[in-house]
Amino acid sequence: MCVCVPPYAEATLKEGFYPSSGLATAGYRSAKYSPEEWHINNFSTLHQAVTDRNNAERICHDSKTLYKETEAGTLHTQAEGTRHLGERLQHIHFWKSELQRHIEKLVAETDLLLGQKRRLLKSLDATEIPFAIATDNLTCRERRLGPDLVKDRVEEELLKEVELISSIQALLKKTLSQAVNQIKCNRDAKQTLELDWSDKYQAYSLDDQCGRYNNMSTDTEYHPNSDNLQDHISLPPLLCNRDAWVSFTQDNLSVAQREEQASVELRLLVERVLQETAEDLRVQCSNVDQAFSQRCLQLTEAKTQLQLHLTQIGAQERNIMSLQQALYDKEAPLRVAQSRLHQRSHRPHMELCRDTPQFSLVGEVGQISQTMSSLQQQLSAARSSLSHLEESRMVLEKDIGCKTHSLLIDRDKCMSHRTRYPTFIALSGY
């Protein structure tokens, strides 16, 4: 829009001079403007209005351009933020799933290791019975008498058994301590993963909620200081990036995997220890039982031989009685023969001749006398032998008593006590 300006008004405006009524306009003209002043004022008003309108039009044009540019940029930035949130949610979900998987593996592995720990405790308790049996056997065998108190193979095997049980108990206690420590490490790693999983669960919920926000959401608010993240950062500023975030979880998972592997290896070690210790104990138990059986067989044979000697003493006694009876039985025939010879010695004159009856009676007396002499010598020898046997009777009876006592200890007490020896399954911790 063009406005015509008088020449004098243009000159006046250029020079910056505005006319007034002055001192010459006194009286009625003192409170009024001149026509030129009115034109100038009107022009000034129109000019200012034109300038303001031109500025307003330029600003409106610039505003429309800026609005379109900022609208597109804002939508693009918001779309990028939403996309980044979606990607972040995928990453969080992936690592959260990995954490959950390893947490479950740690829980399962810890439960298996707890089962091995219980087996170790049961196996350790089960070794107390063999230890008590072995020490009781040694104590009982200390009460053997006389020459039977010997350091035989049974005692050597029992001492080996006691030493073996002590070493096995020490090994089981050491393995049990390792299992307890590994269970603690598993639980610590599990707790670390659970804390990380919990953080990611909360972060997933928050980012999921953020991803659902849009320009039509009614629950959004102004938070002027929300872009000041320094007060909320948990890591040093240089580490607060995606690589550090991934590395943090990867480090936690690596620790968990190491503990899982260590737990698996320890479980295999526990299984092997329980298997081997149970086998060693049962083998040693078999060795001790075999030594006991051999020793009891030796004692039984020795006792039988001693009892046989006692039987011989009784036989000798019966032999003496038989010899005495034989001598007594010969006295009557001798008296008869001698009486016959004595009576025939009273025959008169020529009747007192050496006839056949005479020779027979003389031979009979000689034979009976010789027989009685032989029986008497044999009786003397038997009595001498019986005297020597009587001297050894007390020794034999004492030795038989020792063997009986030793058999009572080894067979009736020790071997019967060893029947309560734990089975292989019990020694394995089941």
Image: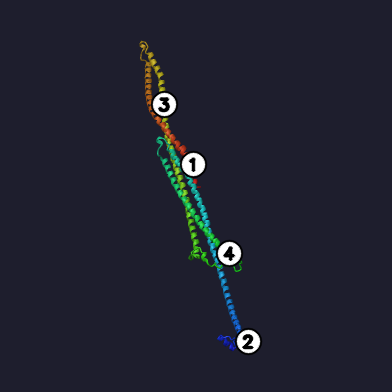
Viewer-side label of 2, 1: 2
Say what secondary structure mark 3 lies in: helix
Residue at mark 2: 27
Say whether marks 2 and 3 touch (CB < 8 Å).
no
The answer for how far apart the CA atoms under marks 4 and 1 are is 68 Å
Please indicate, yes or no, whether residue 289 appears anywhere in the rendered image: no
Say what secondary structure mark 2 lies in: helix
The residue most toward the bottom is 7
Residue 72 versus residue 382: which sits nearer the camera?
72
Residue at mark 1: 420
Asked if residue 291 is positioned above or below residue 183 in the image, the reply reads: above
Asked if residue 208 lies left or right of residue 264, the reply is right
Q: Quadrant of the N terminus?
A: bottom right
Residue at mark 4: 209
The answer for how far apart the CA atoms under marks 1 and 3 are is 48 Å
Q: Residue 340: x, y in percent?
A: 39, 15
Residue 136 versus residue 290: which sits nearer the camera?
136
Say what secondary structure mark 1 lies in: helix
Q: Which of marks 2 and 4 is nearer the N terminus?
A: 2
Asked if residue 308 lies left or right of residue 12, the reply is left
The answer for how far apart the CA atoms under marks 2 and 4 are is 81 Å
Residue at mark 3: 317
Asked if residue 362 is positioned above or below residue 290 in the image, the reply reads: above
Q: Residue 29 carries which label?
A: none
